[in-house]
Image: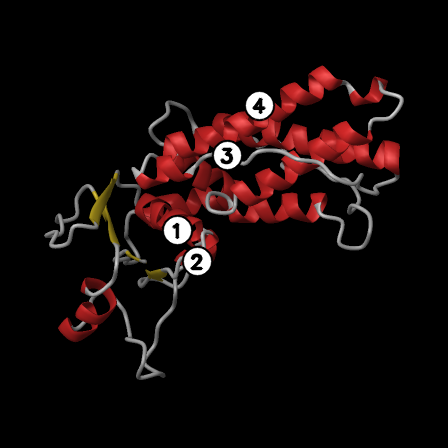
């Protein structure tokens, strides 16, 4: 499965993020994904993009800028098993010629405009805002509500409890169901996909409030389930917010036998 998006320094930022989410999601399923990206090299770190960089140093891979030769197009695109065209609203619609073709149409957010927001608020806030662009809300209030108040507070409380009651050593076991994002992403509904992740946070926060582990004589089972929820969120967020997902994993996986020192996961943004 290959995902292809034509990018230029003034490409639509949201189509880049949409394509990146799809590429990361299907990589997690084990699919072989080709996310071909061109345009300005600054786009990649700015929006935490994971596209494949091709050059002409190897005869087996095509050099890609804003177009391909007919032979390379045939090889890398037309002959693929499944294709998703990720295009902006102002872009010409591709001519579909295969039963597995699909088109993800994106509203236009110019990269040059978004770059200023990334520098001020970070890629996590901007990616989340772009992915939920169908939902009314401004960037800063949305990031503070979902990433600071909800997700950040939950992860901070759980890791704090593990440090308080177990000196940072994770309890054994624990289980929590993952978000069901695949059906939503299959129909390019990024709002529904991120809603599924938000629901995991709400359910886990409700479980924390109802179980009240600080009042239990033996809170290990509850703490194990809560920590499992944090780890599930770290994995579920990889396609959407890869940088934030990494920070959650760093706090919730005990690589040295105990959790890393507790720190605020996502500080509140200021306008």
The answer to which image quadrant residue 61 occupies is bottom left
* Residues under numbered marks 4 and 3 in contact, where contact means CB atoms less than 8 Å apart: no
Q: Is residue 229 left or right of residue 96?
A: right
Q: Which mark is residue 179?
A: 3
Disc 1 from disc 3: Cα separation: 19 Å
Q: Earlier in the sequence, mark 4 or mark 3?
A: 3
Q: Is residue 195 left or right of residue 86?
A: right
Please give the count of numbered marks on the rendered protein. 4
Q: Which residue is mark 2?
A: 50
Judging from the image, what secondary structure is the residue with disc 3 in? loop
The residue lying at 50 percent from left, 32 percent from top is 197
Disc 4 from disc 3: Cα separation: 12 Å
Judging from the image, what secondary structure is the residue with disc 1 in? helix
Q: Earlier in the sequence, mark 4 or mark 1?
A: 1
Q: Which residue is mark 4?
A: 202
Where is residue 217? Give x, y as percent: 89, 22
Disc 2 from disc 4: Cα separation: 29 Å
Judging from the image, what secondary structure is the residue with disc 2 in? loop
Q: Which residue is mark 1?
A: 20
Q: Earlier in the sequence, mark 3 or mark 2?
A: 2
């Amino acid at each position: 499965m290959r995902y292809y998006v034509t990018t230029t320094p003034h490409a639509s930022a949201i189509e880049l993020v949409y394509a990146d989410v799809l590429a990361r999601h299907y990589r997690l399923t084990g699919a072989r994904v080709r996310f071909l990206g061109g345009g300005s090299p600054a786009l990649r770190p700015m929006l935490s993009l994971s596209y494949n960089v091709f050059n002409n140093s190897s005869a087996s891979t095509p050099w890609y800028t804003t177009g391909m030769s007919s032979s390379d197009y045939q090889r890398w695109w037309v002959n693929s098993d499944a294709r998703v065209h990720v295009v902006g609203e102002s872009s010409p619609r591709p001519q579909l010629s295969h039963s597995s073709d699909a088109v993800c149409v994106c509203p236009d957010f110019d990269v040059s405009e978004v770059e200023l927001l990334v520098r001020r608020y970070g890629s996590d806030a901007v990616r989340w805002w772009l992915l939920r662009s169908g939902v009314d809300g401004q960037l800063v209030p949305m990031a503070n509500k979902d990433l600071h108040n909800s997700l950040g507070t939950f992860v901070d409380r759980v890791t704090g409890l593990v440090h308080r009651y177990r000196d940072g050593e994770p309890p054994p076991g624990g289980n929590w169901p993952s978000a069901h994002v695949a059906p939503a992403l299959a129909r390019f509904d990024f709002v529904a996909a991120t809603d599924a992740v938000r629901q995991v946070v709400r359910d886990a926060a409700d479980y924390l409030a109802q179980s009240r582990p600080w009042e239990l004589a033996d809170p290990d089972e509850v703490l194990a389930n809560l920590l499992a929820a944090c780890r599930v969120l770290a994995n579920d967020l990889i396609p959407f917010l890869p940088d934030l997902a990494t920070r959650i994993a760093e706090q919730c996986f005990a690589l040295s036998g105990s959790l890393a020192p507790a720190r605020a996961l996502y500080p509140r943004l200021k306008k």
